[in-house]
C-alpha cells in the first residue's frame, strides 16, 4: 500500500503516521514527495495557542474522506508534552480517515505501544476518576468500550493481587536469563541458542551468571533493597542440566537478601522436551512451584512447522509429571494464528487445555518479529486472516470466562495479527506477580545473564531507563564483570544516598 502524505514535511510527524498506517495494511510505504500512490492524505495543522485544530482529507480514486479534531492544550505548559498532544491529535485524525476508507475499526484506537494498561494506571494514580479516565480513553485515543472494560478489569485484578503495587518503587524484581533452547522456534527473537554441542559455552556462561548473582546480591544486602519477585527466563531455563540448576538455585538462596520473603520465584520450563523428573525434584527442593509448560498448539503439524521438537503427547505427559512432583502453579501458553491454524485448531487447543486446567493460561497472538525466521520467510507460512484471528481470540475470551479464569495482565506487540493483544488469564490467587511488575513498570527489573535486559525505574520520578547485557554468549563471558559494575553504578544512583551539592 503506497500512501502519499501531502504537505507534511515535518519529520517529527512521520513516525506516528507510519505506525497508524501499519495498523491497517501489511505492506505500507509512506511517500512524502508526490508520486504514484494508492491513497493520498493531506493535513492542515492550525496551532491556535490554547488549542490545536487538525483537519485531514484522504483521497483514493474517486472516493474522498474528511476528518478533523480540535484539542485543548491549556493543560500542557511544557513544550515536549504540548507537542506530544499535537502528534496524538494528528494520529487521531489519520486513524479516523483510514477507518472510514477501509471499514476496519481499530479497537485499540491510536494506541500502538506495548502497555495500554499502564496508561490507565497512570490516569488513576494522577487522581482521575474511572469515569473521567474512560472518557479520555474513548474520546482522545478512540479506544472501544470493550477494550476499555478489559483494561479496567485488569487494573482492578492487579490491585487486588498486589494492593501495594504503587508503593513498590524501592523494591526490585530480578530476571535471570538462560539463553539456551533445544531448538529455535520460527517465530522467536529472544536471545536463545540451540544447545547441541554448546556445553562449553554453557559452562562459561554459568560462571558469569553466578558472579553477577553474587555481586548483585551483596549490593542489595548492603543497600537494604528488597526483592519482590525472581523470574528465570530465556531461552528455556530448564535446558541446562539438573546439577547446573541445583547449583544456580543454591547460589540464589545463599546470596540474595531475605529469600524467604521474596513473594514469587518462577522458572519458565516452557519446552516440554527439557523437563525431567530430576529437574522437577530440584525445583521442589527449593520450593519453586510456579513454572510454565508451553504447548503453543495441540496440533502436531503446527509444532513441526514452527520448529518445536516435542510432541503434543509429551506436553500432556510432562504436565502430569510436574503435578506428580508437586508443581501446583503451572502456566501454559497458546498462540493464536500459528501457520495453517484457524478457528478449528484453536477450539481443539482450548479443549485439550480444559482437560489439564493449568492455574494460568497466557493467550498470545502471533507477531511477525523483524528478526524471526518466520518473518524472513513469510511466504512459507500461511497465517489466518484478520477476521479469523479475531474469531480465535473470541473463542479464548469465552473459554476462559466459562472456566473461571480472569485476565490479569496484557501487552501488545508490533506487527501483531489483527492488531490484537496478548492476555494472561489466571484462576483466583494464581496470577504471576512478575508479569504484573514487568508490564506495569512500577519498579526496577534487574536483568542478570546473557541477553538479559535491565529496566531501571527512578523511585522518585518514575522515569525509565534501560541497560542490556550482550546477547552473544562470548561477548557476555568476556565482559560480565563490567556489565555487573555498570548495573550496580546505576542502582546506586537511583537508590543510594545522594549528597547535597
Image (cartoon, rainbow, N blue to C red):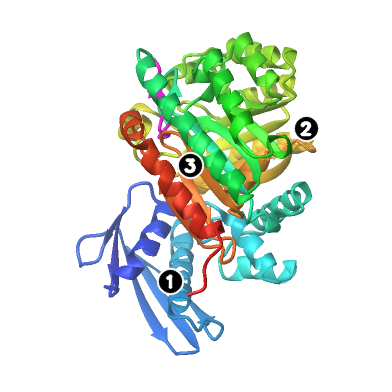
The answer to whether residue 185 is seen in the rendering is: no
Instruction: Say which residue appears at 67% left-offset and 38% top-offset.
Output: 432
Earlier-in-chain disc, 2 versus 3: 2
Instruction: Say which residue appears at 56% left-offset and 51% top-offset.
Output: 444
Q: Nearer the viewer, mark 1 or mark 3?
A: 1
Circle 1 sits on which residue? 87
Q: x%, y% of residue 274?
A: 53, 15
Mark 3 element type: helix
Q: x%, y% of residue 411?
A: 56, 47
- What secondary structure predominates along the stretch shown in magenta? loop
Residue 297, quarter of the rendered image: top right
Circle 3 Cα neighbour tier, 10 Å, few/some/many (<14 / 14–19 / ≥20): many
Instruction: Say which residue appears at 59% left-offset and 50% top-offset.
Output: 223
Q: Which numbered tag is attached to residue 417?
A: 3
Residue in the foreground of this view, choosing between 349 and 494: 494
Left or right, residue 149 beside residue 177:
right
Mark 1 element type: helix
Please determine whether, in this image, residue 186 is positioned above or below residue 368: above
The answer to whether residue 248 is seen in the rendering is: yes
Q: Which residues are magenta?
A: 188-195
* Residue 171 covered by magenta stretch: no
Left or right, residue 214 beside residue 327:
left
Q: x%, y% of residue 156?
A: 75, 53
Please determine whether, in this image, residue 107 is positioned above or below residue 447: below
Mark 2 element type: loop
Residue 346, quarter of the rendered image: top right
Distance from the alpha carbon under mark 2 to that under mark 3? 25 Å
Circle 2 sits on which residue? 403
Q: x%, y% of residue 254?
A: 62, 30
Please determine whether, in this image, residue 484 is positioned above or below residue 45: above
Distance from the alpha carbon under mark 1 to that under mark 2? 42 Å
Circle 1 Cα neighbour tier, 10 Å, few/some/many (<14 / 14–19 / ≥20): some
Amino acid at each position: 500500500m503506497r500512501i502519499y502524505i501531502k504537505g507534511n514535511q515535518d519529520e517529527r510527524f512521520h513516525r506516528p503516521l507510519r505506525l497508524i498506517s501499519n495498523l491497517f495494511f501489511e505492506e505500507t510505504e509512506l511517500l512524502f514527495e508526490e508520486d504514484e500512490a494508492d491513497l493520498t492524505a493531506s493535513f492542515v495543522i492550525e496551532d491556535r495557542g490554547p488549542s490545536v485544530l487538525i483537519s485531514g482529507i484522504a483521497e483514493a480514486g474517486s472516493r474522498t474522506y474528511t476528518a478533523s479534531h480540535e484539542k485543548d492544550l491549556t493543560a500542557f505548559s511544557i513544550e515536549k508534552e504540548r507537542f506530544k498532544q499535537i502528534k496524538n491529535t494528528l494520529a487521531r485524525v489519520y486513524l479516523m480517515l483510514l477507518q472510514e476508507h477501509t471499514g476496519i475499526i481499530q479497537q485499540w484506537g491510536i494506541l500502538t505501544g506495548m502497555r495500554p494498561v499502564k496508561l490507565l494506571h497512570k490516569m488513576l494514580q494522577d487522581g482521575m476518576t474511572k469515569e473521567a479516565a474512560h472518557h479520555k480513553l474513548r474520546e482522545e485515543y478512540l479506544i472501544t468500550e470493550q477494550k476499555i472494560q478489559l483494561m479496567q478489569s485488569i487494573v482492578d485484578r492487579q490491585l487486588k493481587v498486589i494492593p501495594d503495587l504503587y508503593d513498590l518503587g524501592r523494591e526490585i524484581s530480578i530476571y535471570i536469563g538462560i539463553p539456551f533452547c533445544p531448538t529455535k522456534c520460527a517465530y522467536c527473537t529472544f536471545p536463545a541458542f540451540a544447545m547441541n554441542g554448546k556445553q562449553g559455552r554453557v559452562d562459561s556462561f554459568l560462571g558469569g551468571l553466578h558472579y553477577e548473582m553474587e555481586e548483585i546480591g551483596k549490593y542489595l544486602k548492603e543497600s537494604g533493597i528488597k526483592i519482590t519477585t525472581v523470574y528465570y527466563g530465556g531461552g528455556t531455563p530448564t535446558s541446562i542440566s539438573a546439577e547446573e540448576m541445583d547449583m544456580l538455585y543454591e547460589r540464589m538462596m545463599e546470596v540474595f537478601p531475605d529469600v524467604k520473603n521474596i513473594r514469587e520465584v518462577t522458572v519458565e520450563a516452557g519446552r516440554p522436551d527439557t523437563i525431567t523428573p530430576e529437574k522437577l525434584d530440584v525445583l521442589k527442593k527449593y520450593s519453586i512451584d510456579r513454572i510454565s509448560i508451553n504447548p503453543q498448539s495441540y496440533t502436531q503439524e503446527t509444532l513441526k512447522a514452527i520448529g518445536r521438537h516435542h510432541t503434543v503427547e509429551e506436553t500432556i505427559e510432562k504436565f502430569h509429571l510436574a503435578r506428580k512432583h508437586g508443581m501446583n502453579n503451572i502456566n501454559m501458553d497458546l498462540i493464536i494464528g500459528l501457520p495453517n491454524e484457524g478457528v478449528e485448531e484453536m477450539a481443539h487447543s482450548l479443549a485439550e487445555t480444559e482437560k489439564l486446567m493449568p492455574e494460568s493460561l497466557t493467550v498470545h497472538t502471533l507477531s511477525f518479529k523483524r528478526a524471526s525466521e518466520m518473518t524472513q520467510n513469510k511466504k512459507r507460512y500461511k497465517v489466518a486472516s484478520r477476521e479469523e484471528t479475531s474469531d480465535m481470540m473470541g473463542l479464548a475470551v469465552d473459554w476462559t470466562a466459562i472456566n473461571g479464569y480472569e485476565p490479569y495482565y496484557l501487552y501488545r506487540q508490533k506487527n501483531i495479527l489483527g492488531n490484537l493483544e496478548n492476555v494472561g488469564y489466571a484462576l483466583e490467587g494464581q496470577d504471576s506477580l512478575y508479569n504484573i511488575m514487568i508490564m506495569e513498570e512500577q519498579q526496577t527489573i534487574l536483568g542478570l545473564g546473557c541477553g538479559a535486559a535491565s529496566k531501571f525505574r527512578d523511585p522518585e520520578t518514575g522515569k525509565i531507563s534501560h541497560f542490556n547485557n550482550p546477547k552473544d554468549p562470548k561477548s557476555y563471558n568476556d565482559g560480565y564483570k563490567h556489565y555487573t559494575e555498570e548495573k550496580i553504578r546505576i542502582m546506586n544512583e537511583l537508590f543510594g544516598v545522594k549528597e547535597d551539592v
